[in-house]
Image (cartoon, coloured by chain):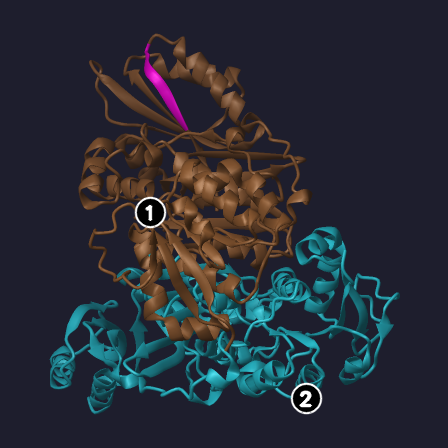
Chain colours: A brown, B cyan
């Protein structure tokens, strides 16, 4: 059997320890698949004395992760996280030296993916990031290789397990966002500071990488419109149910003519669709290709095992010598995308208005919709109460988002429409 | 750019033509991904004069496909089909000569996969078959590479689009098997001779390959218990609905201790599960791994575009030099599986009895179940009619299949139980 493939682990949080566990538990099977043994020879983490449930005493410990590049290794596995800092320094120095680099760091690649691809490919180093998107789902490999024969038209995904867990629990329990979030934090499904997840940033980082890979364009995080789930109410969830939908936070990228339109936002998807059936902490990615038609991949989006499984898959690929362009095509072929305006995309929408239940309010609302050329498919009112605000929800026929936005502005001028009305895209699968 | 990767197409049915179309339509993008252009230099098909909607006039035509091996090519793409014959001869001679071989032929590999892997790996030739299982779903790649870090515990799949289409239509229309089959034939979703699909053979070939790949064992088609969908009645479908299930033809392989248990049979799966939501001609494959937990991949299982997309993905992999062991580990490491008995696997079951609706019949049935230690979760009776047979269906609690089979034998001795009762496994996802 060939020489061992020597790796260094930068960061020994749950994922780092998970990687070490897998490489030990399945050492023999992995060596057979990779054609050579894989050895952890060095690690770096803040606190050497911490009990991690794994014995790292026989490997070299390095205090400053950025110096791992000086060890005698073939590959650095980065699980430190963060858009810049040590993770970025380490990526640059490793790749510049021709070392392979495996990372679970979506922020790093969403912001610096193009520059890092350039360094990697220029130095014949592998740069792999399966764990960065949708955890245990091998979606990077699927798009880069499995669907490689296709011109991809769209890629959609439930890309954040925390949000999907919260939305699922809101639906099942009928409770509101804040109360379910608090529970999710207790259960470890949401961070103490949940902003990164619930405001959509994490999903946006992941979508950014999927977009680059699917369409062969330079990743550009700044061109992404992002809306999280903090404004989704239990009333929306209940109305979605009555209308035959479920609310999911979707990352969406789609070709519209020569442009690419991408966004992260809560959407309604049909309850009976496979996407609609993806609940709890599960992630899913949906793909449209011109020959393969559609594909859907479902799995756990986070957690020690699934994420470490993805990291180790990348390590095995690299150990056996598979080295592919970072975003599917050579970095020099990645195009500057023509980012389209979301306003031009036609779809159905859900609208939620809080109104005073007085005669004439519906006539006012209907007139505004008519003036903006928005036609209505269904309308529901929750209860009747002449003295208190009630909710009216509607679903539109296919219409451009900008028309709906105009209607919302029109509603703001109506005396009996209270609060700012909310809207949500309806996506059919 | 490097030398072109030269391929020959053996067989120009819909898939063969589809491959040529993709390679032409996306020539530039594919060359970027593969690192070199891919050229079709020779083809073989029965009738040169037939209009295939694609111009093959500038390539070498060969009458006898088995002579393609003599052309100056890097790779033979076999889309002739059949367990033996030309397909087998061509595979053996190509691989022996060190040529790469891409095939959509599940029968060939289910029967001769081990021998062909030996020839391929012994001559450093690539042997790829993504299109052989679940069409456009990149499941071979997912198991071989994406989930490579895992010890796989189970792989389940909806592997035959014809069967899934028929079962879906039976549910949606309430019509019986024969009438839906006739329609499927008219629509081109079922062959004129549908036996291969509806009796489960096609799904069994595919499962055989998934089992070998997932568990690192020699494929062994003979060790597969196969039951098709020909005995699924519209009554079963309706009861499934009432009980919250859908009927799917599943290929299932699972580790039970040191043994592997595999079968193809119609099963009930929860209506609300993602697997239950996979309808029509779509296929799905479900995987359990010890670290990744579960994964589900969904897509089109057949058709020109999806199948050709899978074939071209394999060609791109080979063109860029990726050459992996055929079944994930070197052929010499593939084990002789210890095939387990299905009777020992515990699960819930659905039973369907036709009985005369007379006092005492339920007592007799219940006593038989008690004697076989089968406990019942739910029971439904269809209508009441003292003069005619009625249907009684039951779902059991978790129980070994052999106990249920004993109960069925017991029912055969009951005067008021008419016909042979049917049973179906209930699979939870």
Q: Is residue A227 above or below residue B411?
A: above
Q: Is residue B33 above or below residue A23?
A: above
Badge 2 crowding class, 10 Å Cα cut-off, few under 14, some 14 to 19, many 20 or more, is few
- Residue extending farthest to the right is B58
Residue receiving disc 2:
B85
- Name the residue nearer the viewer: B32 or A406: B32
The C terminus of chain B lies in which quarter of the figure? bottom left
Residue A115 drawn at (x, y percent): 57, 39
Q: Is residue B146 magenta?
A: no
Dominant secondary structure of the magenta stretch? strand
Residue at mark 2 to residue at mark 1: CA–CA distance: 63 Å
Mark number displayed over residue A63: 1
The N terminus of chain B lies in which quarter of the figure? bottom right
* Mark in front: 2 vs 1: 1
The residue depicted at 80 percent of the width and 61 percent of the height is B54
* Highlighted range, magenta: A416-423
Q: Is residue A99 above or below residue A247?
A: below
- Name the residue nearer the viewer: B288 or B132: B288
* Number of disc labels: 2
């Amino acid at each position: 059997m060939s020489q061992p493939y020597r790796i260094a682990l930068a960061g020994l949080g749950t994922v780092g320890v998970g990687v070490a566990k897998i490489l030990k538990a399945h050492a023999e099977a992995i060596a057979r698949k990779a054609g050579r043994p894989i050895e952890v020879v060095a690690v770096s983490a803040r606190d050497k004395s911490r009990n991690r449930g794994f014995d790292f005493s026989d490997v070299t410990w390095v205090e400053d992760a950025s110096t791992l590049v000086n060890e005698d290794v073939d590959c650095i596995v980065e699980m430190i996280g963060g858009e810049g800092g040590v993770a970025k320094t380490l990526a640059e120095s490793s790749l510049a030296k021709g070392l392979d680099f495996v990372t679970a760091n979506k922020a790093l690649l969403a912001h610096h993916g193009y520059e890092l691809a350039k360094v990697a490919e220029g130095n014949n180093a592998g740069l792999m990031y399966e764990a960065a998107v949708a955890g245990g789902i091998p979606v990077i490999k699927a798009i880069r290789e499995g669907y490689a024969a296709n011109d991809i038209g769209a890629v959609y995904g439930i890309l954040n397990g925390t949000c999907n867990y919260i939305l699922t629990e809101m639906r099942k329990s009928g409770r509101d966002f804040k109360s379910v979030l608090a529970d999710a934090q207790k259960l470890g499904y949401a961070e103490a500071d949940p902003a990164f997840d619930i405001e959509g940033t994490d999903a946006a980082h992941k979508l950014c990488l999927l977009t680059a890979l699917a369409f062969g364009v330079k990743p550009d995080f700044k061109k992404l419109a992002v809306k999280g789930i903090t404004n989704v109410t239990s009333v929306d969830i209940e109305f979605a149910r009555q209308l035959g939908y479920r609310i999911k936070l979707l990352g969406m990228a789609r070709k519209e003519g020569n442009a690419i339109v991408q966004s992260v936002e809560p959407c309604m998807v049909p309850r009976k669709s496979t996407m609609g059936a993806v609940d709890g902490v599960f992630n899913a990615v949906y793909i449209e290709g011109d020959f393969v038609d559609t594909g859907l991949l479902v799995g756990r989006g986070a957690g020690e095992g699934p994420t470490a499984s993805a990291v180790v898959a990348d390590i095995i690929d690299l150990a056996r010598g598979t080295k592919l362009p970072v975003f599917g095509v050579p970095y020099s072929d990645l195009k500057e995308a023509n980012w389209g305006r979301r306003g031009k995309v036609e779809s159905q929408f859900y609208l939620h208005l809080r109104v005073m239940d007085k005669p004439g309010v519906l006539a006012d609302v209907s007139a505004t919709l008519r003036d903006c050329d928005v036609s209505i498919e269904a309308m529901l009112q929750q209860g009747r109460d002449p003295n208190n605000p009630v909710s009216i929800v509607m679903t539109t026929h296919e219409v451009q988002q900008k028309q709906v936005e105009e209607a919302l502005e029109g509603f703001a001028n109506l005396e009996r429409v209270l609060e700012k009305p909310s809207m949500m895209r309806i996506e059919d699968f």
